[in-house]
Amino acid sequence: MSLRLENVSKQFGGLRAVSNVTFCAEPGRITGLIGPNGAGKTTLVNLITGILSLTEGSIGFGGEDLTTMSPTDVARRGVVRTFQNVRLLLDESVVANVALGFYRHGRSSLLADIVGLPSARAEIRKVHEQAHGLLHRFGLEPYADTLVRNLSYGHQRRVEMARALAAKPSLLLLDEPVAGMNDVEANELGTIFSSLAASGIAVLLVEHNMRLVSSICEDLVVLDTGRMIASGKPDAVLSDPAVVQAYLGA
Amino acid sequence: MLAQQILNGIVVGAVYSLFALGFNLIFGVHRILNLAHGGVVMVGAFAGLYAVLAGLPIWVAFLAAALAAGLLSVLIDFVAFRPLRQRGEMEFAALVSSIGVDMVLTTLAQRWSGTQVMRFPFDAFPISSFTLFGLRMTTMQLTILGVVLAVSVLLVIYLYGTSFGRQVRAAAENDRAARLLGVNVTAVYVQTFFISGLLAGLTGVLLGLAFNNVYFLMGEPLLLKGFVVLILGGLGSLKGALVAGFLLGIIQAICTAYLPNGLSDPVVYGLLFVIILLRPSGLFGDTVRNVRAVRQ
Amino acid sequence: MMSFLAAYHPLIDLLLLNCGCAFGQYIVLRAGAFSIANAGLTSIGAYTAAILATRYGIGLGGTLLCSTAVGLVVAILLSLPLARLRGVYQAIATLAFVQIVLTLALYAEGLTGGALGLNAIPKLVGTPTLLICVLAVFYLMAALDRTRLGQAFDAIRQDEIVAATLGVQIASTQVVAFALSGAISGLFGGLIALHTYSIDPNQFGFPMLVSLLAMVVLGGRRSIYGPIVGATILTLLPEIARPLSDNRTLVHGIMLILIIVFLPRGVVDSLRGLSFRKPRRLQQGVASDVPSA
């Protein structure tokens, strides 16, 4: 399923944070969203996931209109995100945080949950097992029972990523997922992103790391002060004078 | 007859307004639901009472009450709210902590006053009545209206006419951004809590004089009536607090006139639920901010 | 052993009642709802039980079932406008709810006996019944602790935005929490009435609200042992240190401030944080461990 933004705008008081942005993120590809600080990238992610309301324009995903949906409803359509400043449940263990990612796929009925029927509890056990599998993939296995608040920032990032994958997204929004990581770690994650895209989901990658962006993105969208100044293939976009100007001139 | 009731209701409403202004100033700027505000009012009333009993003139009593309550309010911020800042779940923590403060204030006052209802000496405030458009009005009522209107005007001038006020409004808009812009956020907290306390102190003395009693639990019913005002006017809205205070006074006067004795309070509190159900943002509040998990 | 039980019998009963009421408060707070309606819900349960038992001679089972059901229904009605609103609204409205229940109980003298309350309620409840009820509630809490519902509660309490972006339905989850809270409070209100011969409106007022809140905040809002620990400490403390019992309300007030400032997660949840295995290699000194600005 593809994500379509049409003329999306967001006004904060006197500030137009996002202005007439139109683009598509296709399934099976990584679409890079780049731009200098304050360009409106995170605002755009918040608009897509239902945390902020649009001033103008519309957002569609698959055949559905997300424009006015609540964050919960957006999430239930398979739109999953990570946050720029990692947001986890600090008082829960690593495995419990990842298990929360499976929430939207849960099958147990409310009544079974309330009286704690064995079936409802078995489901959570199964979810924890699956979560362990993801922990293994991200090298977090030794920390499974550690409270997230006792974890280093780098590991918290990975927990958030594992949680996002646990939700089995159809559209994955990554808000600066490799910020603060070294090249080896960034490339490691980059490989994971590529394989996710290859499995048929749409990935929107907000990132500053140009090397990563140019190596794994099939499409690029460049924002500057809320406006879209370029879009297309990475090579073409990155040599566009307006883009060079935005990055070097600022 | 009804007109007379409504006039009396407006005067009571003015006191509600004054209370709600102080409460909403804190909530509007810092998002702290200060449930100890009723306790601060009570302490103000006691401060005013003791000033009068010490032989001081009534205007000094007003001043003493306002000052005492203002300082107490700043102290509460330091003890109960300041340590909670920059922590998750601030709203819940502040709520719990303010309930604790209210409990401490009322228990101490109960000890201090020996659970007695105390009264201002009857000559503390010169009361004479006059007739205006066929309605009887006392100098007491006139004073209440005068104080509330004067305070509202001063508050507007402070918030919209001074550089302090601009800083307060900037902090209300966005704490962190204000900090980056060089606003001294600590000074803002001290100011808002002090002003909120001043208003509470005045509320306390006016209330004590008007109903001629000062007792340790006097803040509790006021806090509850204050809630109805806050919800009716919109949480965090000063304009709403002012208008809704008067409105509640009138509604209550009409309820008292037409409903059996003892049923007026449940009806007024019930009103709170009706408003929450139909229009949670009240008359002047900000709708989206109040509903969770929706687009903001 | 028998003499020990006899001497401390009233205290044990009080402790069990407090534990049950604390669970009613716990379940809403765990779900991130700022409801402090429990004193009111308990009051409704108590009056329901007292009226049914004294006027209509209904037996223990039927009475408690009705108390529970009434608490449940009232809590659901209360939650419908509140669950979709922010916490501060829930706090204000539920505090007002407690007051409404109190004023109505004072007003409706024919039904509730007004300020004098209801007396000569048959004592149908002893320690065994109380113990069974507390255990039943504890089992329920332990059971839902390990289901999707418990998962949703913890997510909403800690970060609403995260919960929503993972598909948790916040409003309906909180309606469930309110409902459970209402049922538990109703049940224990009924038990209070059938245990203590007489009830009056003021025993379900602000002081009860504060002590329930203090128990849960002290014990912790996450672990199912939290309310038990909180209730035990606050019930036994005044018995151990006599001077404290004269200042019970003052102690509760100061406790609330101190706990929320110094031990915001409560006793049990803070201990749980310590007992959790620390990561073996916390700092590896790689670039990924440096927090970005």
Image: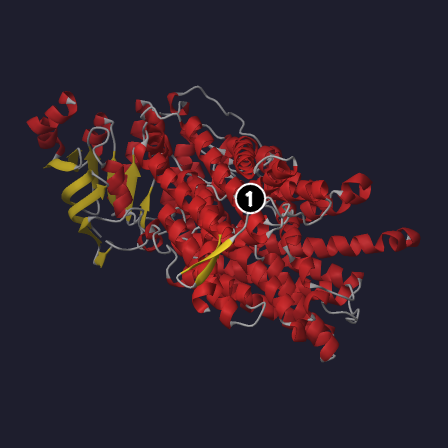
Residue C172 visible in the current orientation: no
- Along the horizontal axis of the image, is C31 left or right of A172? right
Q: Nearer the viewer, residue C93 or A75?
A: C93
Q: Nearer the viewer, residue A79 or C90?
A: C90
User: Is C30 above or below relative to B272?
Assistant: above
Residue depicted at 27% across the width and 37% down the height: A42
Within 10 Å of the Cα at label 1, are there few (<14), some (14-19), or many (20+) other Cα atoms? Answer: many
- Along the horizontal axis of the image, is B152 left or right of A21? right
Q: Which residue is mark 1?
A: B205
The colour scheme of the drawn protein is secondary structure
Q: Position of residue C26 (x, y in %)?
A: 59, 51
From this viewpoint, which residue is outermost toward the top? C285
User: Is C36 above or below relative to A243?
Assistant: below
From this viewpoint, which residue is outermost toward the right? C3
From this viewpoint, which residue is outermost toward the bottom? C56
Q: Position of residue C206 (x, y in %)?
A: 63, 53
Residue depicted at 40% across the width and 42% down the height: B150
Q: How many marks?
A: 1
- Along the horizontal axis of the image, is C46 left or right of B58? right
Q: Nearer the viewer, residue B2 or A231?
A: B2
- Image quarter (top left, top right, bottom left or bottom right) of the C terminus of chain A: top left
Residue depicted at 46% across the width and 64% down the height: B4
Chain of residue at mark 1:
B
Residue B217 visible in the current orientation: yes
Q: Position of residue B130 (x, y in %)?
A: 47, 56
Q: Amino acid at mark 1?
A: Val
When asked about the image quadrant of residue A121, the answer is bottom right
Badge 1 marks a residue whose secondary structure is helix
Q: Nearer the viewer, residue B65 or C97?
A: B65
Q: Position of residue C164 (x, y in %)?
A: 38, 50
